[in-house]
Amino acid sequence: MADKMKAAVFEAVKVIKVKEVPIPEIGDDEVLIKVKNTGICGTDWSIYNGWYSSDKLPMIPGHEFSGVLAKVGRNAKGLKEGDRVTADINMSCGHCYYCMQGDHLLCNEFTQLGIHTDGTFAEYVKARASLVHQLPDSLSFEEGAFIEPLSCCIHAAKAMNARVGGSVAIVGCGLGVLHARMAVLRACAPVIIVGDNKKRLRIAKEMGADYTIDINEVADPVAEVKKLTDGRGVDYAIEAVGTTKTYEQAFAMLRKGGVLSAFGITGEMDTMQIRPFEFVLGEKKITGSCAGIGDDWPDAIALLAHKRIDPKPLFSMKVPLEDLEWALHELRKDPNLFKIFVSPEISQREVL
């Protein structure tokens, strides 16, 4: 194997260079993965703009990925070169207070591959062998690269723990489309999704959502949600945008005793206005969820492999590493694009 690889390096804020860098060296407990596909995530856009992890630059981002094992450390059990894989990106210390409680996402030394350490916008990436998941033969490498975002939605669904028959409103039609599908799979009803993109709202409806609300066509989405729930509001609301305004709207959509699932990431110092009075007399609740981890990953693989979730309508195109910066901007410009994959193995763009 050569000792150099091609990678898209975020050298500084809004500066990406595709260049030759050393192939990562692995330890006994690690594996080297030849990357097939990496999905572009909103987090990558935040890193590019310096809103998140700017202290880690220069760095190779990318974390929604799939690939093939190229090298296996001597302590990696049950794995072999050539295996089709992905890997849990979440790394914790394993021995702090939070880890001992099983709350690995809260670990004081918590890091994520491609967000705090070099990731998968490259030909190769190294990962902890203990975090590797093998892909069923029935899954494509594109579907394999979609396991990470789906695991995040699964983690949020578990935290919210919606009951059968509970009404759910999802604010946002990016990953909100997956949240809506998860609510349908939990036998929630009605499932209402609120957004600003007709194509995505249509896909959500095709995936089982009962109602869609286009904010470009209604003056007050909160009022529309209440109309659909006999004036009460929903049992559960999921915020999947990440702005103060949409968080306040999602909270206002809840009935008394309802639960808000906080999923969208806002700016670190952003604040929202909520009256404590509503918590006390309305007994409203909030759950937070930042990533999929542990058994969320095999659960995501099972849902994809058994076709409970078909993500292919969300796949837009695949581009070479050299087009990563173009794709980051194009996702913001073209509302009809959903998921773009980056592949180091292709030389021109492919429509999926």
Image: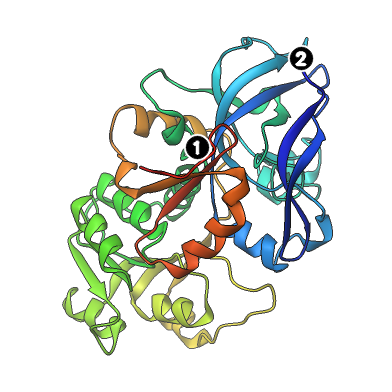
Q: Return the disc, 2 or 1, that comes first in the chain's sequence.
A: 2
Vertically, is 260 above or below 137? below
Between residue 31 and residue 287, name the one nearer to us. Answer: 31
- Residue occupying image coordinates x 72% and y 36%: 6
Q: Residues within 10 Å of mark 1 (few under 14, many from 20)?
A: many
- Residue 122, horizontal then vertical, whole percent: 68, 38
Q: Residues within 10 Å of mark 2 (few under 14, many from 20)?
A: some
Residue 185 is left or right of residue 91, and the answer is: left
Give the numbered dot on residue 228. none
* Residue 111 visible in the current orientation: yes
* Residue 232 visible in the current orientation: no
- Residue 205, horizontal then vertical, whole percent: 20, 57
The C terminus sits in image quarter: top left
The N terminus sits in image quarter: top right
Q: Secondary structure at mark 2?
A: loop
- Residue 67, horizontal then vertical, whole percent: 57, 27
- Residue occupying image coordinates x 47% and y 52%: 156
Q: Secondary structure at mark 1?
A: loop
Between residue 16 and residue 189, name the one nearer to us. Answer: 16
Residue 84 is left or right of residue 203, and the answer is: right
Between residue 195 and residue 24, name the one nearer to us. Answer: 24
Mark 2 → mark 1, Cα distance in angstroms: 23 Å
As drawn, the residue found furthest toward the front would be 348
- Residue occupying image coordinates x 48% and y 29%: 298
Q: Which residue is mark 2?
A: 73
